[in-house]
Image (spheres, rainbow, N blue to C red):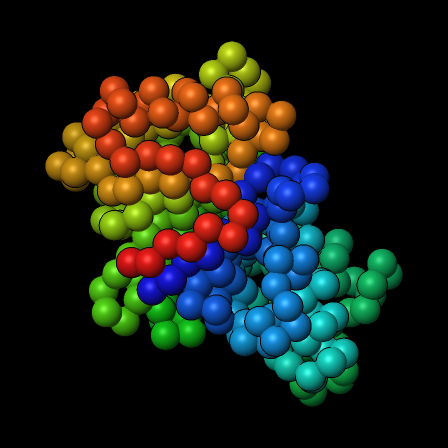
Amino acid sequence: MEIQILGAHLTEVKGARLTSLLFDSTLVVDAGGLTSALSLPEQKKIKTVLLTHHHFDHTRDLVTLAANAGYYWRGQLEVYALRYTLDVVTSCLLDGKIYTNFLEYPSKEKPTLILEAIEPYSRKNIAGYDVLAVPVKHSVPAVGYQITSSDGKSLFYTSDTTVGISGQWQHISPELLIVEVAGPNKYGDWLKKAGHLCAEFLKEELIQFRRLKGYLPRVIVIHIGNPYEQEIKEEVAQVAQELEADISLGYEDMKITL
């Protein structure tokens, strides 16, 4: 299983894209900075999108991907998310007011986007992967995904989350953990209120993981607050040293093979 980090940041500036992950060229998890990272032939390979929650930095490029698929090759994309997430995305992004309604284009009989609700804690075969959606603490309803390939390789992506994610460790056993750190430790109080993590919070959650599971997987940090990247990098490195763990920052176009 090859994972490509298309977007690794909290906001978008030159050289930094919004959150998006690509699996084996065909499955996307979150559609923040997606289309600007891939050529049209690369986008044409995508068949499935999983959304963790409805925030714009995780859903924006769903419509730009749909535009390319719908306009240029009449493709269809399956989109999976919580029912709540799908309802918000439908009413705000796919209502036909700010852009084409890709739930009906090019026709209601064969729309570009096909939406399907997922149920938390219920394993589902999606595009050949075993997918488990696990609720995570955030400011809006959200899930993380454990994604397991046909040969048994697995990762867990927390999406946006905060203190208390350790309550969900019992449901997963990944080889790779992709987690957010949105800001530095000095903004911990604000980050917690906003539903995010800093390195200090991440450390405590990882301690709980090791205590419960007896191991720590490789950890890659994304959803990085752009102006604080160096500070976050140093704080994450300190956590890695203290836990004697493999923890590092992700970056745009990074590729990981499991």
The mark tally for this picture is 0
State the residue at coordinates (26%, 50%): 174
Where residue 166 sits, quadrant-wise, is top left
Left or right: 11 with respect to 48? right
**The N terminus lies in quadrant:** bottom left
Check the image and name the residue furthest to the left.
214
The percent position of residue 155, horizontal first and vertical second, equals: 32, 53
Q: Among all residues in the image, which is located at the extreme top?
A: 186
107 above or below 158? Answer: below
Q: Position of residue 17 (x, y in %)?
A: 62, 46
Q: Nearer the viewer, residue 226 or 125?
A: 226
Name the image quarter holding the C terminus.
bottom left
Residue located 45% across and 41% down the image: 250
Q: Is residue 124 above or below residue 120?
A: below
Q: Position of residue 154 (x, y in %)?
A: 29, 57
Task: In this rendered view, identify the residue nearer to me: 206 or 104.
Answer: 206
Question: Does residue 187 appear left or right of residue 93 in this picture?
Answer: left
Say which residue appears at 69% left-offset and 53% top-offset. Answer: 60
Q: Is residue 251 visible?
A: yes
Question: Residue 228 in the image: x percent, y percent?
Answer: 57, 23
Q: Is residue 254 left or right of residue 20?
A: left
Specify whether residue 135 is in view: no
Q: Residue at x 78, y 69 (%)?
A: 101
Q: Nearer the viewer, residue 182 or 228?
A: 228
Q: Residue furthest bottom?
A: 109
Rendered position, 213 above or below 124:
above
Q: Is residue 37 above or below residue 16?
A: below
